[in-house]
Image (spheres, rainbow, N blue to C red):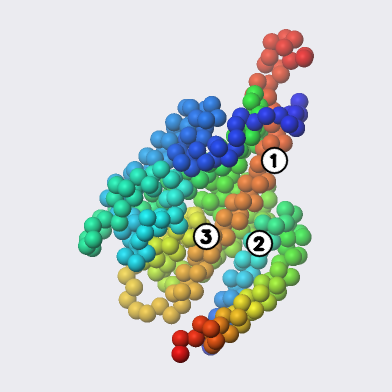
Amino acid sequence: MNDIGIHLLLFAVIGAGIMTMAAFYSEPVDSPALRSIPRRLVVFAIGCGILAALMILAEYTVASVN
Amino acid sequence: MAPEPAAEGRGNPNVAAILTWLIPGAGHVYLGRPIFGLVAFLVVNGIFLLGVRLSQGMAFEFLQTDLRSPIAPVLTPEVGNLSAVIWHMREYGFGPPFPRPWPASIDLGTWLTAFAGLLNGCLACWAHFDARVPKGMRPRRPSPGLLVLAAWIVPGLGHWLQGRRLRGALVFAVVAGFVLLGTWLAQGANLDRERHFYYWSGQFLAGAPAWILELLHGHDLVRSDIRYVDAGLAFAAVGGLLNILAWLDVYGVAEREALESLVPEVEPSAMPAGEGAA
């Protein structure tokens, strides 16, 4: 697997773990907590994607060191 | 007999917790339990002082020069025992301005000082709960402080002891799995406090999985470039930090269940005849 593939895989793993724990922290009952994990993971991935896009944008504009 | 909903506790929970944070056991002395407070003080500070002795007070000398500041210990587990960490900084600080060899027992020593800090955090949880228990009552369920301690030492054990077994197993899988995966990616380089001071603090929160791995592989020499060391550090530290969410979950449920389980300290059957009739 290439490097970007490994990074995406690691991101998926860490995202799944973070969202599992967040779901358990937010929902006192197990079943709703488990059902909410996929939705939370999608929101997490979209949020991280937006953040990454903003960082790349900043890197090439206001935070550029060239 | 069910407790009155508005029954007054033994003291202010926040004051009890903050006093414990400042001086181990002080919260329980404030709540009228001086013997418990004294024993807690001796245990927590005994572990801390043993750690200082074994590390010869060099715990914060692990920090690189550019990371040293008076508030640098704020992000370490030792900060759970505030008076001790202030004393440590005043007494030893960051050591002399030249490098010197570490004592052979420094890893065990700094582990003990960190352990004392988080142990005092659990004691603060205990004091916070005890302050809410009305005078003359006692909970039939374990103290939330004890369950948080269990949840720290073995991730998921607090949930397991509460009967929430699926949740406990998943918490263990996530926290221990992250520490294990992080250690594999970083080839064990993440487990050395000298090498990664603050990441170590994060993964220390994961409890036994991190401690056992450190005991087995924590201080091996790094002989080559480790490609995914940064990812490994992140995984292991995030595993420990996620365990905090588990503690909060355990504490919330344990506190509610314990407050619902209050019974009189002296059972009505043990009272003299006629005393419990009123």
Report which residue position mark 1 lands on.
Answer: B257
Outermost bottom residue? A66
Whether B216 is drawn above or below A50: the answer is above
Residue in the foreground of this view, choosing between B213 and B229: B229
Identify the mark nearer the N-term, 1 or 3.
Answer: 3
Residue in the foreground of this view, choosing between B213 and B5: B5
Outermost front residue? A62
Task: Using the numbered discs, state the Cα–Cα distance from disc 1 to disc 2 in whole angstroms.
Answer: 22 Å
Evaluate whether label 2 is on the same chain as label 3: no
**Mark 2, secondary structure of its residue:** helix
Residue in the foreground of this view, choosing between A5 and B137: B137
User: Residue drawn at (54%, 60%), measured in percent from left and top?
Assistant: B241
Whole-percent x and y of residue B26? 48, 34
> Seen in the image, is B79 located left or right of residue B144?
left
Looking at the rendered structure, the kind of residue marked 3 is Gly
Report which residue position mark 2 lands on.
Answer: A22
Give the letter of the chain under mark 1. Answer: B
Whole-percent x and y of residue B269? 71, 17
Whole-percent x and y of residue B246? 61, 54
Looking at the rendered structure, the kind of residue marked 1 is Glu
Query: Can you say which quadrant of the picture contains the C terminus of chain B?
Result: top right
Report which residue position mark 3 lands on.
Answer: B240
Give the letter of the chain under mark 2. Answer: A
Q: Nearer the viewer, mark 1 or mark 2?
A: 2
